[in-house]
Image: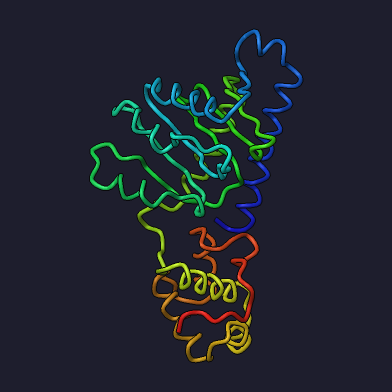
Amino acid sequence: MSDRAVDDLEEALLGVSALIESTVAINRDRYSTDRLITTIAGPYRKVLDTAQEMITGARSTIDILHARRVQEEERTERSERQLLYRADPSVSIRLLCSPELLDEGFVREQLGREHPVAIRVARVPPLQAIMVDRARALVVTGPAINRRASVIRVPEVIHTLHILFDNVWRGAVPAGERIVFGDRARAAFARQILGALRAGVTDEVAARDLTVSVRTYRRYVAEIMTLLGANSRFQAGVRAAELGLLPSDGRDGRAPGRPGPE
């Protein structure tokens, strides 16, 4: 997705979160009575209990947005990954995940399975959501210390969540088609080069910042363009953004001047 699309998505998802919170605040008594919104308080295991109940009770579809990092104090003996294997084999499962939270082991486990989980990767704001049968959703937002978790059955909210999920899913990259640059050091170096390409800096400036020769820098640019299937440097930068290979500011957090792999 382009930066503009990512910004629009983030604004929309934040809007959904605000909609959920305002719906609860304004209609708390009525929705509590009708059980259209149920707040989940207490330890994280209660969230997992609810997720397990929803997953095992699904009859047709499970759509999962996994973009919120679980904090250390929220970890238990169970994981969301394990819960998915408890779903009925006839249920269609889609998992939309942010690049930094993708479980490579889980991706490999789907290879050769008769009913694999469909996994796609996209840059999305930090949010957890499990939507079952397009009828109810478990939504988790915020850090562990201020976590907000609710089961939502309000049709308007469910409809909005699914519209957003479907729109992002269409533009997301299947997990098996991601670009892999190698080990962590090489991947970090490649992201810095991609950031330089997208920023349009000259080869000389980029090579100096990365403390490599211009010739070495250009060799890496050519290799990256080949991996991305790009015909131009600009196209490589755009393609990298679409694949979620770059953070929104185009930097990977490494200080300039540290040498990359020669």
- Name the residue nearer the viewer: 81 or 29: 81
- Name the residue nearer the viewer: 171 or 220: 220
Residue at image location 44% in from the left, 81% down from the top: 222
Q: Which coloring applies here?
A: rainbow
Residue 158 sits in quarter: top right
- Name the residue nearer the viewer: 150 or 161: 150
Residue 219 sits in quarter: bottom left
Residue 231 position in % (x across, y down): 44, 75
Outermost residue toward the right in this view: 26
Q: Is residue 250 above or below residue 69?
A: below
Q: Is residue 72 above or below residue 207?
A: above
Residue at image location 58% in from the left, 86% down from the top: 211
Instruction: Judge left or right: residue 219 versus residue 126.
Output: left
Q: Is residue 77 above or below residue 171?
A: above
Residue 24 position in % (x across, y down): 70, 21
Residue 46 position in % (x across, y down): 54, 25
Residue at image location 44% in from the left, 25% down from the top: 52
Residue 143 position in % (x across, y down): 65, 40
Q: In this figure, what is the number of numbered marks?
A: 0
Residue at image location 61% in from the left, 85% down from the top: 202
Quarter of the rendering occupied by the N terminus: bottom right
